[in-house]
Amino acid sequence: MCGIVGFTGSTAASPVLIEGLRRLEYRGYDSAGVAVQRNGQLRLVHRMGKVAGLAEAVEQEQLEGTCGIGHTRWATHGRPSTANAHPHTSCDGRIAVVHNGIIENYVELKEELEADGHRFTSQTDTEVAAHLIEAAYAQTPDLVEAVRAATQRMAGAYGLAVISADEPGAIVVTRKDSPIVIGMGPDGARVASDVIALIDATRDVTVMADGELAKLSPTEITYYNAAGQVVDPKITHIDWDIDVAEKGGYPDFMLKEIHEQPRVIRDTLAGRLVDGTLAIDELDLSVEELNLIDRVYVIACGTSYHAGLIAKNLIEGWARIPTEVEVASEFRYRNPIITPTTLVVAVSQSGETADTLAAIRDARCKGAKVFGITNVIGSPVARESDGVIYTKANKEIAVASTKSFLGQVVSLTLLGLLLAQVKGKMRTNQIRLLFRELADTAAQVESILSDVSAIDEAALACKDASSALFIGRGMGAAISYEGALKLKEISYLHAEAYAAGEMKHGPIALLCDGFPVIAIATQSPVYDKVISNLQESKARGAMIVAVATEGDEEIRKHADHVIYIPKVRDCFSAITASVPLQLLARSIAVLRGCNVDQPRNLAKSVTVE
Ligand code: M6R
């Protein structure tokens, strides 16, 4: 969703801001803007649409100055428009603010500020922050204090970066439930809502904590706690490279990230089997505590939820612990049965999904232990969970999750094995064997990636369809849900997923000549049942695309297109079978002329409810 950048240093601010905003484009946005401070004035430029348009406008306007802030906006309060684009300013135009999050009490604050004579020019919640800071600055002309006083009035979530025409070279930032990272580069200090916007300047960053403030100047950064006292920052070293933000010869990030998956599997498993025993030390729970767990909830949204569906099969199958998978937006508003022996596993690529975070807080309040599985170091999910497993996907840029999904599935598989180990449901040599086979999936995914001709052929056959059905049973059903989501989000082709046995209870009515049915028909205990479902579909004219196991010649009798994948144990089939579905969705999207990396209306991190 929205993105924040800021720079104060010895060189021109605009190019740094524009480059930072470009790096944040992947998050999804509808408008963008910058404010730059110079000679006791602030100058602003806003544009609807892409950062490229803003860059042209900034060049034409010759925005000079070495201190500024910038923003990409994904509309929540007020439609996408130039007037609603950030930065927003105070009445006198001397304070400019960029904001991520939602100020929940903005209506009340706006009424109060208007009654005091403040004039608003946008429909946004953010603008109240600019006016509140203006009012506080009038009382105490110190930007840190004014921001601190203003945020004490604000309810909701905010990452804020603020500049004032009266404080040359200073950017004040603060946050609550919305990420802000800060770093000092060779040419000055930078702030951003995502480390990717400043990693080319420094890898040593401070991930701000809720309520903290910081004042950036060209040569130093001062941190304050919520009470306004100076505090020492906690520095985090980022160990991934900036080349994650480049396409590396691939036509789009999605394809690049799909190809990174063998590496993700290997990195996620590295160091996990110590002397033949599984080890996930980050969970921070003793074997005795783990042994007491008698119920698991996996909470997540979107693709991460689908990783949870896969985990349910594994945890119940291996560890024999009842496991529920719930979309976080529902979990948080129910009254789930939680006891001190309940384990809640919160899965989130970004680590900042608002619904997942709220569900974590709720679960912890009710006494559950919460494990986070996330891809982002220091993210809110990581900080607010009792223990965390980091997926080793590295930064994911394409909005459609691929490599982080695989990282989640592999991490959840490890968790399933660990629970089976501590519960004594599996022998050590069985666990070692499964671990080895799990590790082998990296090479199997490589082999799938080495020949995509059957996938491309199936994509051509599907590209003009208006709808598609994904089916499977058992693990295959869980994989189908993810396949359908991938297809609809990037190709805008309507797709639904069904447990294949449910077809005859409704969706079979959709089938007609040429209707694409994409089936997970790998070797599994329910293979024969899936074949029956394919026959039912074929009898109604459906065009069948089957993802099947190498060597299965029988499947050709039932399917129009077969995508073969290497033979794996059913419990690992989600890892291998998901990959052709990712590639299929991408190929169809490309054939339909869609922007694969930045699908319409979607944001990479969904930081609002
Ligand atoms: O960052 P999260 O994993 O919490 O995000 C959850 C969903 O928003 C996300 O998986 C979404 O469904 C993606 N667009 C899937 O490709």
Image (tube, grey):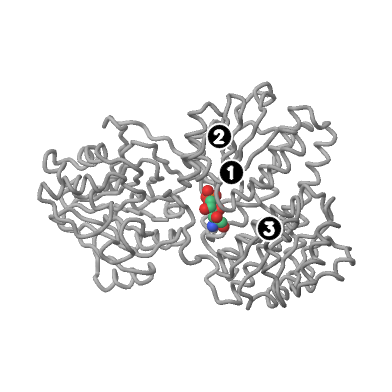
Q: Is mark 2 within 8 Å of ligand 1?
A: no
Dot in front, 1 or 3: 3
Local packing at callout 1 (Cα closer than 10 Å; few below 14, some 14-19, many 20+) is: some
- Residue 183, placed above or below residue 370: below
Q: Are marks 2 and 1 in contact (CB under 8 Å)?
A: yes
* Quarter location, residue 578: bottom right
**Residue, x 39% and y 37% (percent of image)?**
209
Name the N-terminal-most of marks 2 and 1: 1
Residue at the spot of label 3? 498
Q: Amino acid at mark 3?
A: Tyr
Residue at the spot of label 1? 326
Expressed as whole percent of the image width and height from the top left, the position of residue 433 reads 83, 40
Residue at the spot of label 2? 336
Q: Amino acid at mark 2?
A: Pro
Local packing at callout 3 (Cα closer than 10 Å; few below 14, some 14-19, many 20+) is: many
**Residue, x 30% and y 49% (percent of image)?**
161
Name the N-terminal-most of marks 3 and 2: 2
View extreme (left): residue: 117
- Residue 484, placed above or below residue 435: below
Expressed as whole percent of the image width and height from the top left, the position of residue 17 reads 34, 59
Expressed as whole percent of the image width and height from the top left, the position of residue 395 reads 54, 53
Name the N-terminal-most of marks 1 and 3: 1
Distance between mark 2 and mark 1 Cα atoms: 10 Å
